[in-house]
Image (cartoon, rainbow, N blue to C red):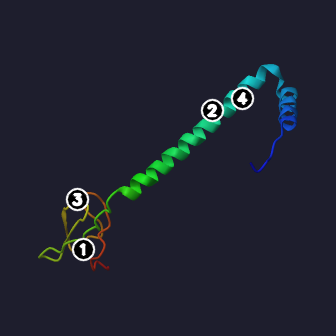
Amino acid sequence: MPFRLEPLDIVLILGLALILFGPRRLPEVGRGLGRAISEFRRGVQDMTQGLRDEAAAPPRPAPKAPAALPGGGSVCSKCGRPNAPEARFCSECGVPLVGMSNDA
């Protein structure tokens, strides 16, 4: 252990805590500290499990480029709705239509 607390040190710390918080509040402080430590452990476990799940999941396919329509318009890559040639955003879902030459 990096701190190397000896029994006398622990008794001194507990005595100071008893003086500072009093005998009535000391169990509340201990309970709160225990809950905080368990909540921290649970959060760390959830985070590491999420990272493991994400690492084990198969890679997602790359998004498809918007398809061009015969009239010069484009099809939204998110919802599949055809859009006018001058459109910069999808008229259905509002996603920017990237990859098209819509410079105005």
Q: Nearer the viewer, mark 3 or mark 4?
A: 4
**Left or right of residue 45: residue 1:** right
Residue 60 in the image: above or below residue 22: below
> What distance separates the C-alpha of mark 1 from that of mark 3?
18 Å
Residue hosting label 3: 79
**Left or right of residue 30: residue 71:** left
Q: Which mark is residue 86?
A: 1
Q: Nearer the viewer, mark 3 or mark 2?
A: 2
> In which quadrant will I find the C terminus?
bottom left
- For the residues bearing labels 1 and 3, Cβ distance under 8 angstroms: no
Residue 69 x/y as whole percent: 14, 73
> What distance separates the C-alpha of mark 3 from that of mark 2?
46 Å
Q: Nearer the viewer, residue 39 or 84?
A: 39
Query: Which numbered disc flags the more N-terminal residue, 2 or 1?
Result: 2
Q: Residues within 10 Å of mark 3 (few under 14, many from 20)?
A: few
Residue hosting label 4: 30
Q: Residues within 10 Å of mark 4 (few under 14, many from 20)?
A: few
Which amino acid does the dot numbered 1 rest on?
Answer: Glu
| Secondary structure type for disc 4 | helix
Q: Residues within 10 Å of mark 1 (few under 14, many from 20)?
A: some
Q: Residue furthest top?
A: 24
| Secondary structure type for disc 2 | helix
> Looking at the rendering, which quadrant does residue 38 occupy?
top right
Residue hosting label 2: 35
Which amino acid does the dot numbered 4 rest on?
Answer: Gly
**Left or right of residue 45: residue 11:** right
Which amino acid does the dot numbered 2 rest on?
Answer: Arg
> What distance separates the C-alpha of mark 3 from that of mark 4?
54 Å
Q: Nearer the viewer, residue 38 or 63?
A: 38
Residue shown at 18%/75% (left/top)? 68
